[in-house]
Image (tube, rainbow, N blue to C red):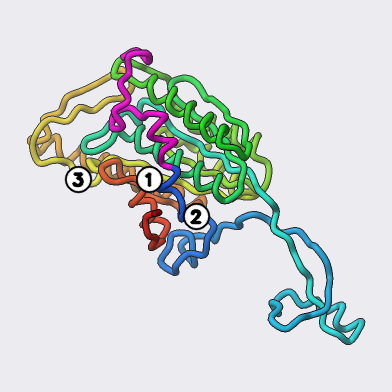
């Protein structure tokens, strides 16, 4: 379907108005807030995110109520009086949202297409960063193209990122084809070159096309940045229907399978579930926190649960 004839219904194709309208629902969500023990971002599940950095401000006399962890013992031994070091939090930091809009994302068996779920997640991540006072940018990778959006702290930059996502999303169609085998690694490599240090990087993808280079690239990114992986999957990957027909697509190639036949449903189910396990194993080895989001449910509610937060909807 040509991009100029796409009807953004919010399920197969995303709309800019919908992505911008997710700002209200994103309030109260944070990647760096203190998480409950059960959260994917706390304890032994994954290293805590660094948040924005701290810079030394001054050395002053201790006052009742000061954090004892900030006592300067050298000053205490030298002057015989307690001193504390004070710090100021950096005003902002760059957040890069990597959004997958390849043909592997152009599929949905229930509520949303994976591509739309990824678009919604990306918008929420952008709004979360904006409300945290951070600069927002990203990389949108779709059919044979990667569109960069340089990080800035402004609503206009959030809109620019969402517009890039919508353009890539609307370029998807059943007739489109692409050479995407190395696309994921290409985007990670671009991110490594541009991110530098102290970024928050949100990778939103189904992680199709992982290779031997994906793991070292993730580790390289994580060495100096906070990295979060949001794995978008279709419910059919966990449970293949017992009967009916399923269209399986890879680029321009599409095959209709009668899943009621045992010789089809079992291999298909094993393949899809095995692929999820492979991605989870890769991310576990890279020590990147993993949040799993199904395209068959409400995106925001799942994200809230995955973050381990119990938050009330904004009024």
Q: Nearer the viewer, mark 2 or mark 3?
A: 2
The residue nearer to you, when weighing 268 against 64, is 64
Q: Which residue is mark 3?
A: 239
Please tell me which of labels 1 and 2 falls first in the chain. Answer: 2
From the top left corner, tell me how far across and down residue 25 is, in percent. 40, 48
Number of residues whose C-alpha sits closer than 10 Å to that of mark 1, classed few (under 14), some (14–19) or many (20 or more): some
Residue at the far right: name it: 78
Residue in the picture at 25% in, 42% down = 296
Label ID, residue 30:
2
Residue 186 belongs to magenta span: no
Alpha-carbon span between mark 1 and mark 2: 28 Å
Mark number, residue 195: none
Residue at far front of view = 315
Q: SS of the residue at dot 2?
A: loop
CA–CA distance between discs 2 and 3? Answer: 31 Å
Residue in the image at 79% along x and 71% along y: 85
Where is residue 105? Give x, y as percent. 35, 31
The mark lying in front, picked from 3 and 1, is: 3
Q: Residue at x 56, y 57 (%)?
A: 49
């Amino acid at each position: 379907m040509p991009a100029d004839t796409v009807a953004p219904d919010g399920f197969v194709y995303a709309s800019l108005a919908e992505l911008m309208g997710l700002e209200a629902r994103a309030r109260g969500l944070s990647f760096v807030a203190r998480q409950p023990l059960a959260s994917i971002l706390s304890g032994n599940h994954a290293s805590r995110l660094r948040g924005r950095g701290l810079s030394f401000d001054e050395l002053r006399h201790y006052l009742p109520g000061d954090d004892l962890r900030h006592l300067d013992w050298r000053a205490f031994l030298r002057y015989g009086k307690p001193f504390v070091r004070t710090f100021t939090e950096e005003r902002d930091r760059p957040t890069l949202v990597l959004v997958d809009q390849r043909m592997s994302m152009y599929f949905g068996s229930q509520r949303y297409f994976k591509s739309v779920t990824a678009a919604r997640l990306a918008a929420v991540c952008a709004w979360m960063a904006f409300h945290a006072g951070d600069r927002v940018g990203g990389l949108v990778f779709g059919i044979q193209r990667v569109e960069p959006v340089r990080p800035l702290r402004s609503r206009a930059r959030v809109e620019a990122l969402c517009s890039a996502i919508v353009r890539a999303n609307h370029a998807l169609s059943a007739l489109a084809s692409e050479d995407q085998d190395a696309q994921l690694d290409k985007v990670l490599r671009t991110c490594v070159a541009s991110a530098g240090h102290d970024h928050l990087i949100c990778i939103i993808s189904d992680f199709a096309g992982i290779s031997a280079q994906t793991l070292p690239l993730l580790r390289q990114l994580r060495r100096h940045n906070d990295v979060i992986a949001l794995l978008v999957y279709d419910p059919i990957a966990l449970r293949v229907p017992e009967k009916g027909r399923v269209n399986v697509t890879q680029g321009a190639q599409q095959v209709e399978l009668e899943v009621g036949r045992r010789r089809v449903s079992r291999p298909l189910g094993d393949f899809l579930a095995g692929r999820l396990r492979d991605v989870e194993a890769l991310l576990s080895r890279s020590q990147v926190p993993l949040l799993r989001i199904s395209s068959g449910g409400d995106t925001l509610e799942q994200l809230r649960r995955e973050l381990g937060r119990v938050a009330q909807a904004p009024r």
